[in-house]
Amino acid sequence: MAQPSVTEERLEHLKHYFIDSDQQFEASKMGMWIFLVTEILFFGGLFLAYIVYRTWYPELYLLASEELHTFWGAVNTVVLIGSSLTVAMAIRSAQLNQIKGLIINLYITIGLACVFMVIKYFEYSEKFAKGILPGAHYSYEGIAHEKANIFFSIYYMMTGLHGIHVLVGIGLMVWLVFKAKKKVFHSGYYTPVEITGLYWHLVDIIWIFLFPLLYLID
Amino acid sequence: MATNEATSNVKRIQVRRFKPEEYPEKHYLNEEKGVWAWMTTVDHKKIGLMYLASITFFFFVAGVLAILLRTELLTPARSFMDADVYNQVFTLHGAIMIFFFLIPSVPAVLGNFILPMQLGAKDVAFPRLNLASYYIYVIGALFTLVAIFTGGVDTGWTFYTPYSATTGGNVMAMTFGVFILGFSSILTGLNFIVTIHKMRSPGITWNRLPLNLWGLYATSIIQILATPVLAITLLLLTMERLLGIGIFDPALGGDPVLYQHFFWFYSHPAVYIMIVPGFGIISEVISTFSRKVIFGYWAIALSSLAIAFIGFLVWGHHMFTAGQSSLANMVFSFLTFLVGIPTGIKIFNWLATMYRGSIDLKAPMLYALVFLFLFTIGGFTGIMLGALSVDIHLHDTYYVVAHFHYVMMGGMVMAFFAGLHYWWPKMFGKMYSEFWARIACAILFVGFNMTFLPQFVMGAQGMPRRYFNYIDQFQSFHVFSTIGAYVMSVAFLIMAGYLLHSLLKGKRAPSNPWGSRALEWQAASPPPLHNFHHVPVIINGPYDYHKPMSEFQLGIAASHNGHHHHGDEAVKVEKSEKEQA
């Protein structure tokens, strides 16, 4: 904290109820970590439902999983892992006061997130066309198992909620770009970039679990 | 500095005594005026009061529903409402009391108000998030109102499938409302944990943390770990009704018992969300009014965490008769008994604190004693329900209803009243009538036991819960119970009367009417907008009644009074300390 050039330090971000920037930064970061814990428990319920039904109907999962396109799932995995890299580079740029690099990296991350959503859109619409709809609307005949609707209910719940999280992440990063262009961030203050990055890594990690559990079991 | 604990034992801070200002002219209630200033405030104290107003409203609504239920039960057959209406009324009574009153009561009202003050902080770590969580609560409440006026809900507050997935009414609006409400609870818990970790004043080490904060800390952990599971459960239930996803519906290949597991994985810990912060209040009140160091500080602090932990492992005891394997039943029964250990540790430590203390039977202490008495009954009957063979007999009878009300109302609500009466002078700067407060407490105690003791008896004799009709042999119990409910409502009316009188015409309260050593009492009553005009420094524990008051009123002796509206001043604070070092 106590740097020699005290007068040059920018502190307009410091809220009055914090003692210094470090306290504010650490509080925000801890808050985000706790939020991520709640997210894991939120998805945990779905993973539990997945485990329970997979134990009851193991052959259903093998059959239904064949309907999913492993290739496009793999592409999406690469896309998301790539976006995790670029968001980490965005944080690095902010730490080094390279605002231009920060903005470019955020743009790339947003782009990759959009690619993910577009691929997901085509996957969904292909299934909808076949009659693979969630729950009671399920009408596909191609899977020889009477509980096939359950698998796809779980599939749509898990990937759907994950998709909503991706959309939220895109929104957050657009907001970050907006802020960065107004020169809000600098090496002494980049908390929103850091905690959005944390959130984005979580979104990525959840997908890394979803991909093998749903696509790779056949 | 609080954040530099690792180095604090080598850094020296100049301190001086700051006596709290008596009868301040300017305080948080009048520093900003107007409705808009209230609606947009990020001040934790005002948000606490907004929660207080809201939960008082819901407590009133659900209380009226309870009176309606008891009145209907005066006669074995129909008295004045139909069976369908009865189902809706008991559902609403339960759902409103639990989700809209009990869960936010202590953390969101008293916790919001007191937690930053006990830490010597100016606010919680995320004030805007705090305000957001209040509005999320309001939005959740609106959804519930929509549910009530568009068909009602008759599932019971547990929303068990498959009934809840198929019954009429507007279950979706209700579960969605509770889903939204969960986020309010999560955000409050998140805020509290970060605040306790990161915003403590110099000298507030973990072993000088008031036990109220240990209680809130344990509660917050449950809130952030359990509530998301409720969220996903209710989301799945909503999807069940919306799309028929079938995960909980046996007709579509799903499993309704899975719903019960999901639901109770949240809702059992949720009863600890309700009761554990009450334990915190009782610790503060008993120590203050016994004028003694709390007995077994670490035992009480860690038993809160132990209850939070064990509370996650006992949900299966709600499903002893739902077709669980007998091995699972045995494990859950055993784990349920374990909860009795940390709870017993607390009770004995409180008793030991009072032993040879100089006990002052002011209203908060009376409520604390009522709590000890009623909660112990509630706890012991809970152990009986946890015993497998006994539970087969008592499951779904009034015995469970009585147990739950002894724990929640006799325990939690009494602890809430203890806290409300204890901190009332701090919150509003006004005293209430001690005489009427004691009268109301006594009437409440009598009315409560009249209402719920007979329910143990008729439950043990086989009166099932949630029934609209009953056989004649139970009528005398029901009548007695209903009269008890009326007695309780008299007590609540008296309480409303003297508290309103206190607000309007009450005597000004001094800064520390109870002579407490805790930090929140070293601020003015009511406190200024930023709680303290200085940065408090703590050198003693919060219950060290054997040490002089002057040692509890220390703050950093710097001329800026700890305020830094501009960033550069904050740096000066840092620098001046370094210079003194």
Image (cartoon, coloured by chain):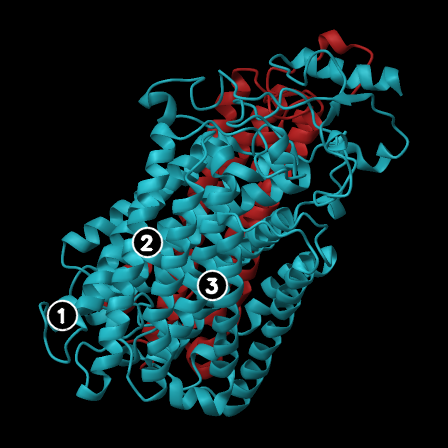
Chain colours: A red, B cyan
Q: Which residue is mark 1?
A: B84
User: Which quarter of the figure has residue A135?
Assistant: bottom left
Disc 1 chain ID:
B
- Sequence-first tag of 1 and 3: 1
Asked if the residues shown at circle 1 and circle 3 are in contact, with their CB atoms under 8 angstroms apart, the answer is: no
User: What amino acid is at disc 3?
Assistant: Val
Q: Which residue is mark 3?
A: B271
User: What amino acid is at disc 2?
Assistant: Ala
**Measured Cα–Cα span from mark 2 to mark 1:** 30 Å
Q: Which residue is mark 2?
A: B491
Task: Between label 2 and label 1, give the one nearer the viewer.
Answer: 2
Q: Are marks 2 and 1 on the same chain?
A: yes
Q: Position of residue B210 (x, y in %)?
A: 66, 46
Vertical placement of B408 versus B393: above or below?
above
Badge 2, how many Cα within 10 Å: few under 14, some, many 20+?
Answer: many
**In this orientation, which residue lies closer to the viewer: A80 or B113?**
B113
Vertical placement of B63 versus A28: above or below?
below
- Quadrant in the picture for the N terminus of chain B: top right
Residue A77 visible: no
Asked if the residues shown at circle 3 and circle 2 are in contact, with their CB atoms under 8 angstroms apart, the answer is: no
Q: Is residue B320 left or right of residue B246?
A: right
* Residue at left offset 41%, top offset 54%: B441
Numbered disc 1: secondary structure = helix
Marking on residue B563: none
User: Which quarter of the figure has residue B475?
Assistant: bottom left
